[in-house]
Amino acid sequence: MGELLGVAVLGAGHMGADHIRRLDRVVSGARVAAVADPDPARAKEAAAGIDGVAVHSEAEAALDAPGVSAVLIASPGPAHEEALLAAFARGLPVLCEKPMVPESEGALRVVEAEARLGRRLAQIGFMRRYDAEYRQLKSLLDSGRLGRPLMLHCVHRNVSSPPGFTSAMLVNSSVSHEIDAARWLLGQELTAVTVLRPRSSANAPEGLVDPQFVLFETAGGAVVDVEVFVNCGFGYQVRCEAVCEAGSARIGEDHTVLVTAEGGARQEVPQDYLVRFADAYDRQVQAWVDATRQGRVTGPSAWDGYAASVVAEAGVRALEGGGRVTVGLAARPELYAGQDG
Protein backbone atom coordinates (compact mmCIF):
# COMPACT_ATOMS: atom_id res chain seq x y z
CA MET A 1 0.00 0.00 0.00
CA GLY A 2 3.00 2.30 -0.30
CA GLU A 3 4.72 4.45 2.30
CA LEU A 4 4.40 3.66 6.00
CA LEU A 5 2.06 5.85 8.05
CA GLY A 6 4.21 8.17 10.18
CA VAL A 7 2.61 8.45 13.62
CA ALA A 8 3.28 11.01 16.32
CA VAL A 9 2.55 9.51 19.75
CA LEU A 10 1.61 12.06 22.41
CA GLY A 11 2.29 10.70 25.89
CA ALA A 12 4.93 8.15 26.84
CA GLY A 13 3.49 6.85 30.09
CA HIS A 14 2.14 3.33 30.69
CA MET A 15 -0.39 3.48 27.85
CA GLY A 16 1.69 5.59 25.48
CA ALA A 17 4.78 3.40 25.83
CA ASP A 18 2.68 0.33 25.07
CA HIS A 19 1.32 1.98 21.91
CA ILE A 20 4.84 2.96 20.84
CA ARG A 21 5.87 -0.69 21.23
CA ARG A 22 2.75 -1.81 19.35
CA LEU A 23 3.33 0.55 16.42
CA ASP A 24 6.99 -0.43 16.19
CA ARG A 25 6.75 -4.21 16.69
CA VAL A 26 3.19 -5.45 16.18
CA VAL A 27 1.21 -3.29 13.77
CA SER A 28 1.98 -3.35 10.05
CA GLY A 29 1.88 -0.31 7.78
CA ALA A 30 3.00 2.27 10.34
CA ARG A 31 6.09 3.65 12.03
CA VAL A 32 6.70 5.87 15.03
CA ALA A 33 7.82 9.20 13.57
CA ALA A 34 7.70 11.33 16.73
CA VAL A 35 7.09 11.05 20.47
CA ALA A 36 6.13 13.86 22.82
CA ASP A 37 6.00 13.85 26.61
CA PRO A 38 6.55 16.61 29.20
CA ASP A 39 9.23 14.32 30.67
CA PRO A 40 11.95 14.17 27.96
CA ALA A 41 13.71 11.27 29.66
CA ARG A 42 10.54 9.20 29.63
CA ALA A 43 9.94 10.02 25.96
CA LYS A 44 13.50 9.01 25.05
CA GLU A 45 13.18 5.78 27.00
CA ALA A 46 9.90 4.85 25.25
CA ALA A 47 11.44 5.59 21.83
CA ALA A 48 14.77 3.88 22.52
CA GLY A 49 15.91 1.59 19.72
CA ILE A 50 13.51 3.00 17.12
CA ASP A 51 15.27 4.62 14.19
CA GLY A 52 14.32 8.07 12.95
CA VAL A 53 12.13 9.14 15.86
CA ALA A 54 11.91 12.82 16.77
CA VAL A 55 11.54 13.26 20.56
CA HIS A 56 9.89 16.41 21.95
CA SER A 57 8.60 17.77 25.24
CA GLU A 58 5.67 19.61 23.61
CA ALA A 59 2.82 18.02 21.67
CA GLU A 60 2.63 20.56 18.86
CA ALA A 61 6.32 20.16 18.09
CA ALA A 62 5.71 16.45 17.56
CA LEU A 63 2.73 17.17 15.29
CA ASP A 64 4.97 19.33 13.13
CA ALA A 65 7.87 16.86 13.04
CA PRO A 66 9.01 15.62 9.62
CA GLY A 67 7.18 12.55 8.36
CA VAL A 68 4.18 12.84 10.70
CA SER A 69 0.89 12.14 8.94
CA ALA A 70 -1.25 10.84 11.84
CA VAL A 71 -1.46 11.19 15.62
CA LEU A 72 -2.03 8.78 18.50
CA ILE A 73 -2.98 10.61 21.71
CA ALA A 74 -2.14 8.72 24.90
CA SER A 75 -1.50 11.68 27.19
CA PRO A 76 -3.61 12.34 30.33
CA GLY A 77 -7.24 13.21 29.61
CA PRO A 78 -7.07 16.93 30.46
CA ALA A 79 -4.53 17.40 27.63
CA HIS A 80 -6.69 15.77 24.97
CA GLU A 81 -8.84 18.72 23.88
CA GLU A 82 -5.87 20.91 22.98
CA ALA A 83 -4.14 18.04 21.19
CA LEU A 84 -7.25 17.09 19.21
CA LEU A 85 -7.90 20.65 18.09
CA ALA A 86 -4.24 21.03 17.09
CA ALA A 87 -4.47 17.85 15.02
CA PHE A 88 -7.70 19.04 13.39
CA ALA A 89 -6.05 22.35 12.49
CA ARG A 90 -3.36 20.39 10.64
CA GLY A 91 -5.80 17.98 9.01
CA LEU A 92 -4.19 15.02 10.79
CA PRO A 93 -6.22 11.85 11.49
CA VAL A 94 -6.20 10.92 15.18
CA LEU A 95 -6.59 7.88 17.40
CA CYS A 96 -7.33 9.33 20.85
CA GLU A 97 -7.35 7.25 24.00
CA LYS A 98 -10.37 7.55 26.24
CA PRO A 99 -11.60 9.73 27.79
CA MET A 100 -11.70 11.84 24.64
CA VAL A 101 -12.09 14.90 26.89
CA PRO A 102 -13.08 14.37 30.54
CA GLU A 103 -15.39 17.41 30.76
CA SER A 104 -18.49 17.33 28.57
CA GLU A 105 -18.18 21.00 27.59
CA GLY A 106 -14.70 20.40 26.18
CA ALA A 107 -15.85 17.19 24.52
CA LEU A 108 -18.65 19.10 22.81
CA ARG A 109 -16.16 21.69 21.55
CA VAL A 110 -14.22 18.86 19.91
CA VAL A 111 -17.40 17.49 18.30
CA GLU A 112 -18.33 20.94 17.01
CA ALA A 113 -14.82 21.58 15.68
CA GLU A 114 -14.83 18.30 13.76
CA ALA A 115 -18.35 18.94 12.47
CA ARG A 116 -17.18 22.30 11.08
CA LEU A 117 -14.53 20.44 9.11
CA GLY A 118 -17.29 18.42 7.47
CA ARG A 119 -15.36 15.16 7.79
CA ARG A 120 -14.25 12.82 10.52
CA LEU A 121 -10.63 12.86 11.62
CA ALA A 122 -10.90 11.31 15.10
CA GLN A 123 -11.30 7.74 16.27
CA ILE A 124 -11.70 7.30 20.04
CA GLY A 125 -9.96 4.45 21.84
CA PHE A 126 -12.84 2.41 23.18
CA MET A 127 -10.96 -0.79 22.45
CA ARG A 128 -13.62 -3.19 23.73
CA ARG A 129 -15.34 -2.80 20.38
CA TYR A 130 -12.35 -4.68 18.94
CA ASP A 131 -12.29 -7.48 21.52
CA ALA A 132 -13.26 -10.84 19.97
CA GLU A 133 -15.78 -11.68 22.70
CA TYR A 134 -17.44 -8.26 22.64
CA ARG A 135 -17.67 -8.41 18.84
CA GLN A 136 -19.27 -11.85 19.03
CA LEU A 137 -21.81 -10.58 21.57
CA LYS A 138 -22.56 -7.53 19.40
CA SER A 139 -23.13 -9.76 16.35
CA LEU A 140 -25.43 -12.03 18.35
CA LEU A 141 -27.52 -9.13 19.66
CA ASP A 142 -27.75 -7.53 16.22
CA SER A 143 -28.92 -10.83 14.70
CA GLY A 144 -32.08 -10.78 16.83
CA ARG A 145 -31.73 -14.48 17.69
CA LEU A 146 -32.17 -13.77 21.40
CA GLY A 147 -34.94 -11.21 20.99
CA ARG A 148 -34.87 -7.72 22.42
CA PRO A 149 -32.14 -7.03 25.01
CA LEU A 150 -33.66 -6.27 28.41
CA MET A 151 -30.63 -6.01 30.72
CA LEU A 152 -26.86 -5.93 30.70
CA HIS A 153 -25.04 -7.13 33.82
CA CYS A 154 -21.43 -5.91 33.90
CA VAL A 155 -18.43 -6.45 36.18
CA HIS A 156 -15.28 -4.30 36.13
CA ARG A 157 -12.60 -5.21 38.70
CA ASN A 158 -8.97 -4.12 39.14
CA VAL A 159 -6.29 -5.49 41.45
CA SER A 160 -5.66 -2.09 43.00
CA SER A 161 -6.17 1.57 42.20
CA PRO A 162 -3.17 3.77 41.29
CA PRO A 163 -2.09 6.64 43.53
CA GLY A 164 -4.40 9.63 43.34
CA PHE A 165 -7.38 7.61 42.09
CA THR A 166 -10.60 9.25 43.31
CA SER A 167 -14.13 8.01 43.91
CA ALA A 168 -15.32 9.97 40.86
CA MET A 169 -12.73 8.21 38.71
CA LEU A 170 -14.42 4.85 39.32
CA VAL A 171 -17.21 6.28 37.16
CA ASN A 172 -15.51 8.65 34.73
CA SER A 173 -12.41 6.52 34.13
CA SER A 174 -13.21 2.86 34.86
CA VAL A 175 -16.94 2.70 34.04
CA SER A 176 -16.50 4.88 30.94
CA HIS A 177 -15.65 1.67 29.07
CA GLU A 178 -18.96 0.11 30.15
CA ILE A 179 -20.76 3.31 29.14
CA ASP A 180 -19.47 3.04 25.58
CA ALA A 181 -19.87 -0.75 25.42
CA ALA A 182 -23.51 -0.50 26.51
CA ARG A 183 -24.30 2.22 23.95
CA TRP A 184 -22.61 0.17 21.22
CA LEU A 185 -24.02 -3.25 22.14
CA LEU A 186 -27.58 -1.97 22.52
CA GLY A 187 -27.55 0.78 19.89
CA GLN A 188 -29.24 3.06 22.43
CA GLU A 189 -28.31 6.19 24.32
CA LEU A 190 -28.10 6.07 28.12
CA THR A 191 -30.70 8.41 29.60
CA ALA A 192 -30.32 8.22 33.39
CA VAL A 193 -27.89 6.97 36.02
CA THR A 194 -28.05 6.00 39.69
CA VAL A 195 -25.01 5.10 41.80
CA LEU A 196 -25.29 2.98 44.94
CA ARG A 197 -22.49 3.00 47.51
CA PRO A 198 -21.96 -0.28 49.36
CA ARG A 199 -19.69 -0.29 52.39
CA SER A 200 -16.17 0.38 51.10
CA SER A 201 -13.69 -2.47 51.08
CA ALA A 202 -11.01 -2.50 53.76
CA ASN A 203 -8.53 -2.76 50.86
CA ALA A 204 -9.58 0.61 49.44
CA PRO A 205 -7.41 3.63 50.28
CA GLU A 206 -8.89 5.89 52.93
CA GLY A 207 -11.67 8.06 51.54
CA LEU A 208 -12.16 6.04 48.33
CA VAL A 209 -15.73 4.84 47.73
CA ASP A 210 -14.95 1.38 46.39
CA PRO A 211 -16.81 -0.69 45.25
CA GLN A 212 -19.72 1.10 43.58
CA PHE A 213 -22.86 -0.20 41.88
CA VAL A 214 -23.86 1.90 38.87
CA LEU A 215 -27.29 1.58 37.26
CA PHE A 216 -28.04 3.02 33.81
CA GLU A 217 -31.35 3.38 32.00
CA THR A 218 -31.51 3.49 28.19
CA ALA A 219 -33.69 5.21 25.63
CA GLY A 220 -35.05 1.82 24.56
CA GLY A 221 -36.15 0.75 28.02
CA ALA A 222 -33.25 -1.55 28.85
CA VAL A 223 -31.32 -1.46 32.13
CA VAL A 224 -27.54 -1.74 32.54
CA ASP A 225 -25.85 -2.43 35.87
CA VAL A 226 -22.12 -2.24 36.55
CA GLU A 227 -20.26 -3.50 39.60
CA VAL A 228 -17.01 -1.53 39.64
CA PHE A 229 -14.42 -2.61 42.22
CA VAL A 230 -10.93 -1.21 41.69
CA ASN A 231 -9.25 -2.72 44.76
CA CYS A 232 -10.49 -6.29 44.60
CA GLY A 233 -6.96 -7.56 45.25
CA PHE A 234 -6.90 -10.67 43.10
CA GLY A 235 -6.98 -9.72 39.43
CA TYR A 236 -8.38 -7.76 36.51
CA GLN A 237 -11.83 -8.99 35.49
CA VAL A 238 -14.30 -7.68 32.92
CA ARG A 239 -17.57 -9.52 32.32
CA CYS A 240 -20.81 -8.74 30.54
CA GLU A 241 -24.06 -10.68 30.33
CA ALA A 242 -26.90 -9.68 28.02
CA VAL A 243 -30.32 -10.86 29.15
CA CYS A 244 -32.82 -10.84 26.30
CA GLU A 245 -36.42 -11.89 25.71
CA ALA A 246 -35.47 -15.30 24.29
CA GLY A 247 -32.15 -16.07 25.98
CA SER A 248 -28.96 -14.69 27.43
CA ALA A 249 -25.28 -14.51 26.50
CA ARG A 250 -22.28 -13.95 28.76
CA ILE A 251 -18.68 -13.03 27.95
CA GLY A 252 -15.55 -12.72 30.05
CA GLU A 253 -15.96 -15.86 32.15
CA ASP A 254 -13.26 -18.04 30.57
CA HIS A 255 -10.68 -15.49 29.46
CA THR A 256 -8.05 -17.16 31.62
CA VAL A 257 -5.23 -19.69 31.46
CA LEU A 258 -5.66 -23.06 33.22
CA VAL A 259 -2.40 -24.06 34.90
CA THR A 260 -1.87 -27.64 36.07
CA ALA A 261 1.17 -28.11 38.29
CA GLU A 262 2.31 -29.40 41.68
CA GLY A 263 -0.58 -31.79 42.04
CA GLY A 264 -3.32 -29.30 41.32
CA ALA A 265 -4.98 -27.06 38.78
CA ARG A 266 -5.79 -23.37 38.94
CA GLN A 267 -6.99 -20.63 36.64
CA GLU A 268 -4.77 -17.61 36.25
CA VAL A 269 -6.53 -14.24 36.42
CA PRO A 270 -5.06 -11.38 34.34
CA GLN A 271 -3.52 -8.68 36.50
CA ASP A 272 -3.70 -5.78 34.06
CA TYR A 273 -5.93 -4.41 31.30
CA LEU A 274 -2.99 -4.50 28.89
CA VAL A 275 -2.95 -8.29 29.37
CA ARG A 276 -6.71 -8.93 29.23
CA PHE A 277 -7.25 -6.67 26.21
CA ALA A 278 -3.89 -7.02 24.45
CA ASP A 279 -5.48 -8.46 21.32
CA ALA A 280 -8.19 -5.80 21.31
CA TYR A 281 -5.59 -3.02 21.45
CA ASP A 282 -3.67 -4.66 18.61
CA ARG A 283 -6.82 -4.99 16.47
CA GLN A 284 -7.86 -1.42 17.23
CA VAL A 285 -4.57 0.17 16.24
CA GLN A 286 -4.20 -2.04 13.16
CA ALA A 287 -7.73 -1.12 12.03
CA TRP A 288 -6.95 2.57 12.55
CA VAL A 289 -3.70 2.35 10.58
CA ASP A 290 -5.35 0.44 7.73
CA ALA A 291 -8.27 2.86 7.47
CA THR A 292 -6.03 5.93 7.73
CA ARG A 293 -3.77 4.72 4.93
CA GLN A 294 -6.90 4.35 2.79
CA GLY A 295 -8.08 7.87 3.63
CA ARG A 296 -10.93 6.65 5.83
CA VAL A 297 -11.91 7.07 9.50
CA THR A 298 -13.80 4.25 11.21
CA GLY A 299 -14.51 3.07 14.75
CA PRO A 300 -15.82 5.03 17.74
CA SER A 301 -16.27 8.70 16.87
CA ALA A 302 -15.90 12.01 18.64
CA TRP A 303 -19.66 11.85 19.23
CA ASP A 304 -19.14 8.57 21.12
CA GLY A 305 -16.42 10.26 23.17
CA TYR A 306 -18.73 13.19 23.93
CA ALA A 307 -21.65 10.95 24.90
CA ALA A 308 -19.44 8.95 27.27
CA SER A 309 -18.26 12.17 28.95
CA VAL A 310 -21.82 13.43 29.44
CA VAL A 311 -23.01 10.12 30.92
CA ALA A 312 -19.94 9.88 33.17
CA GLU A 313 -20.54 13.42 34.46
CA ALA A 314 -24.13 12.47 35.30
CA GLY A 315 -22.78 9.40 37.09
CA VAL A 316 -20.42 11.49 39.20
CA ARG A 317 -23.30 13.79 40.16
CA ALA A 318 -25.34 10.72 41.14
CA LEU A 319 -22.41 9.43 43.22
CA GLU A 320 -21.87 12.72 45.01
CA GLY A 321 -25.48 13.80 45.48
CA GLY A 322 -27.37 10.54 45.55
CA GLY A 323 -30.53 9.77 43.64
CA ARG A 324 -31.24 9.37 39.95
CA VAL A 325 -29.64 11.84 37.52
CA THR A 326 -30.89 12.24 33.95
CA VAL A 327 -28.57 12.54 30.96
CA GLY A 328 -28.95 15.41 28.49
CA LEU A 329 -27.08 15.28 25.19
CA ALA A 330 -26.69 18.10 22.70
CA ALA A 331 -28.16 17.71 19.23
CA ARG A 332 -26.13 15.21 17.23
CA PRO A 333 -24.43 16.86 14.21
CA GLU A 334 -25.24 15.41 10.80
CA LEU A 335 -21.64 14.22 10.51
CA TYR A 336 -22.40 11.51 13.05
CA ALA A 337 -25.88 10.51 11.87
CA GLY A 338 -26.60 6.80 11.67
CA GLN A 339 -24.10 5.69 14.32
CA ASP A 340 -24.92 2.99 16.84
CA GLY A 341 -25.56 4.51 20.23
Image (spheres, rainbow, N blue to C red):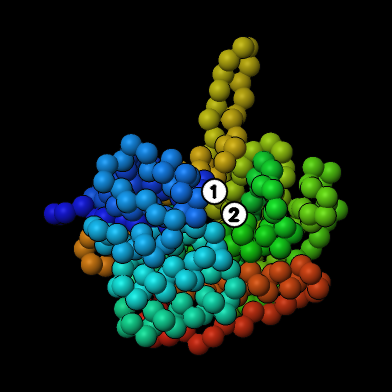
Q: Residues within 10 Å of mark 1 (few under 14, many from 20)?
A: some
Residue 284 appears in the picture as rendered: no
Look at the picture and state if 28 lies above or below 192. Answer: above
Which residue does the image show at 50% across and 50% down from the upper left? Answer: 39
Which residue is tagged 1?
A: 251
Q: Is residue 51 left or right of residue 136?
A: left
Q: Amino acid at mark 2?
A: Glu
Which residue is tagged 2?
A: 241
Q: Position of residue 190 (x, y in %)?
A: 60, 74
Tell me which corner region of the image, top left, top right, bottom left or bottom right, holds residue 333. bottom left
Q: Residues within 10 Å of mark 2 (few under 14, many from 20)?
A: some
Q: Looking at this view, is 303 or 206 the one in front?
A: 206
Which residue does the image show at 32% across and 67% down from the upper left? Answer: 93
Q: Position of residue 263 (x, y in %)?
A: 63, 12
Which residue does the image show at 57% across and 37% down from the upper left? Answer: 270
Q: Is residue 217 left or right of residue 2?
A: right
Q: Are marks 2 and 1 in contact (CB under 8 Å)?
A: yes
